Amino acid sequence: MKVLVFDNYDEASAQAAQLVEAQVLENAQSVLGLATGSTPIGLYKNLIEGVKTRGVSYKNVSTINLDEYIGLPTDHSESYHTFMAENLFNHIDIAIDNTYVPNGMAVSPEEECVRYEEIIDRVGPIDLQILGIGTNGHIGFNEPGTDPESLTHVVELVASTRESNARFFPSIDDVPTHAVTTGIKSILKSKKIILIASGASKAEAVKQLLSKEISQDFPASYLWNHDDVTLIVDQDAYSLV
Ligand code: GLP
């Protein structure tokens, strides 16, 4: 794991964007694995800027998102479909048919998981996967205890994750209880992985990750089993290392 430490969130985001743009410039048909949450917003702002000012094009790029809440309609303000449209897809020249996010409204979420894993294998392999990290070490929605052999699956969100995400909803009761997430094995199929961690709230998680102890209690630790991971952190997130 390569570790890059930056003074602040803006610099970390700019560096992540540089790596994504390098990937797209190297292969115009790249497949990008994308994440939601507050962390990648700065990266996405930089990518939008890159289209407008640096002539980067996503016309032939495909994207595969990590996860989606179960039970939120695609056009719900807090669905990850809406998040991706508002924070990235609406502002770049990507073909929306080439963007994939799990369907949280599928009649059978289990069948949706099988369909989505097939997309990962058919459209992929993902060239570059972007990840954030939960304060408990979750990646995607792979909570502590997730099987390292997991493919796309249905998860029940743990209380701390629902509490963290409650800030986006009118109340904690409105936060969905379940999600579809790509699994740890699905994520590790990616050729390259970038994990971004920013802010003091992630300092414990970054410390735990860099202890190199691989454990089911800390899903991000399985990234040590991959040979091309770059951790991009800011000083606040790195402060306990
Ligand atoms: C969310 C997402 C993850 C994300 C994480 C951290 O619940 N499912 O993909 O990485 O939690 O979110 P944030 O970047 O807002 O701290």
Image (cartoon, rainbow, N blue to C red):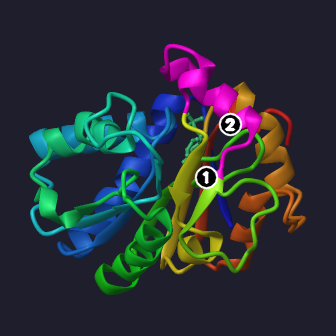
* Mark 2 within 8 Å of ligand 1, using the beta carbon: yes
> Could you tell me which quadrant the C terminus lies in?
top right
Q: Which mark is residue 215?
A: none
The image position of residue 237, as x and y in percent, is 71, 35
Residue beneath label 2, please?
A: 161
Instruction: Mark 2: give few (<14), some (14-19) or many (20+) Cα within 10 Å.
Output: some
Along the viewing direction, whichever of 105 and 75 lies nearer the viewer? 105
> Which stretch did the figure color magenta?
156-175
Q: Main secondary structure of the magenta part?
A: helix
The first of marks 2 and 1 along the sequence is: 1
Q: CA distance from mark 2 to mark 1?
A: 9 Å
Instruction: Classify residue 49 as left or right of residue 15.
Output: left
Residue drawn at x 75%, y 60% as measured from the top left: 219
Instruction: Mark 1: give few (<14), some (14-19) or many (20+) Cα within 10 Å.
Output: many
Residue drawn at x 35%, y 58% as measured from the top left: 20
Along the viewing direction, whichever of 12 and 131 lies nearer the viewer? 131
Residue 65 in view: yes
Residue drawn at x 61%, y 34% as measured from the top left: 198
Q: What's the residue type where badge 2 is placed?
A: Thr
* Mark 1 within 8 Å of ligand 1, using the beta carbon: yes
Residue 58 in view: no
Q: Up-down: is 45 above or below 216? A: above
> Could you tell me which quadrant the N terminus lies in?
bottom right
